[in-house]
């Protein structure tokens, strides 16, 4: 199926799932805004995009900075003409994640990026989606946003539960404006966030779990659905796992 959406803004686009999502959508001719904190990484992703119909905008931005997000969204709208898909993918975790060792500053950083960052994007993108009577918002959440996980830690799980609730409320509030909101709950994915694990993940384990391209394919599936079809929640896990 073809994607009817013409433009997308993807956060955390410099690596991992964000990079894979950007490459997948751009490969279908969608124009993309690549958002993240590291300009060099975003520019490398930009250079990988070859589709002649896909325009690419590089926007370094910390999603936790509300004023910066507002200005960035306006620039993206000006460059691309619209934002028809929003993918809230930026996320962080920390090595010291048990309640015994968790630093309050790390708790604040996870909430600021994983939850408040998603809200900041939604806050500034929704008005134009309402005006254009349509759009797709995807929250890249986590299995830790469905079932609290010691592996993910209390702070990460709390932020992801909140992000999931945000995504579900968007869908319920905005459906009459033609706006669809989907929450994707990936299980373990081979991305740079694994490097924050207290115990290193073995290479053979990294090969067996989900790859970023698997989550990108799930986003592509959502983007290809007709306007009448809406998937509020989508769970995707490694075949080898029994977490769910």
Image (tube, rainbow, N blue to C red):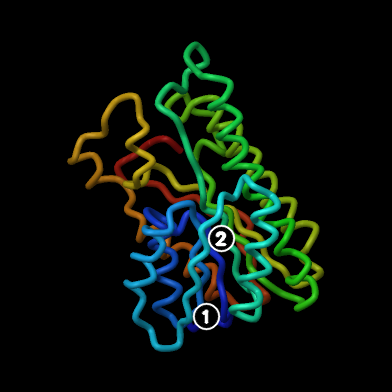
Give the x, y percent position of residue 108.
Answer: 61, 30
Q: Is residue 67 left or right of residue 192?
A: right
Q: Can residue 62 be seen in this view?
A: yes
Q: Of 141 and 124, which appears nearest the observer? A: 124
Relative side of 80 to 235, left or right: right
Left or right placement of residue 177 versus residue 196 in this view:
right
Residue 207 position (above or below residue 51): above
Could you tell me residue 217's position as x and y percent? 41, 65
Secondary structure, mark 1, is loop
Looking at the image, do the residues carrying marks 1 and 2 touch, with CB atoms under 8 Å apart?
no
* Of 110 and 148, the residue lying toward us: 110
Residue extending furthest toward the top:
100
CA neighbours of label 2 inside 10 A, class few (<14), some (14 to 19), many (20+)? many
Q: How many callouts does the rendering have?
A: 2
In the image as oriented, which residue stretches furthest toward the left?
204
Of labels 1 and 2, the one closer to you = 2
Residue 42 x, y percent position in the rendering: 41, 62
Secondary structure beneath dot 2 equals strand
The residue at 60%/64% (across/down) is 86
Estimate the x, y position of residue 118 in percent, counting from the top left. Answer: 63, 50
Choose top left, top right, bottom left or bottom right for residue 114: top right
Q: Mark 1 highlights which residue?
A: 3
Report the Cα–Cα distance between label 1 and label 2: 15 Å
Disc number placed over residue 87 in the picture, else none = 2
Q: Residue at x 50, y 44 (%)?
A: 91
Residue at 36% of width from left, 75% of height from top? 49
């Amino acid at each position: 199926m073809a994607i009817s959406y013409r433009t997308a803004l993807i956060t955390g686009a410099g690596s991992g799932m964000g990079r894979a999502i950007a490459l997948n959508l751009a490969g279908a001719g969608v124009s993309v805004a690549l958002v993240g904190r590291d300009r060099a990484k975003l520019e490398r992703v930009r250079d990988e995009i070859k589709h002649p119909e896909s325009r690419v905008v590089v926007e370094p931005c910390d999603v936790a900075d509300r004023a910066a997000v507002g200005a960035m969204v306006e620039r993206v709208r000006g460059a691309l003409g619209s934002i028809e898909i929003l993918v809230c993918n930026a996320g962080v975790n920390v090595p010291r994640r048990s309640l015994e060792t968790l630093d309050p500053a790390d708790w604040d950083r996870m909430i600021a990026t994983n939850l408040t960052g998603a809200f900041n994007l939604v806050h500034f993108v929704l008005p134009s989606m309402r005006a254009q009577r349509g759009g797709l918002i995807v929250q890249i959440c986590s299995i830790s946003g469905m079932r609290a996980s010691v592996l993910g830690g209390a702070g990460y799980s709390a932020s992801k539960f909140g992000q999931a609730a945000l995504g579900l409320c968007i869908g319920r509030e905005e459906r009459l404006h033609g706006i669809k909101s989907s929450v994707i709950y990936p299980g373990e994915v081979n991305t740079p966030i694994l490097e924050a694990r207290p115990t290193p993940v073995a290479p053979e384990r990294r090969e067996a779990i989900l790859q970023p391209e698997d989550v990108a394919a799930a986003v592509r599936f959502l983007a290809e659905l007709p306007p009448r079809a809406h998937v509020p929640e989508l769970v995707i896990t490694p075949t080898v796992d029994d977490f769910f």
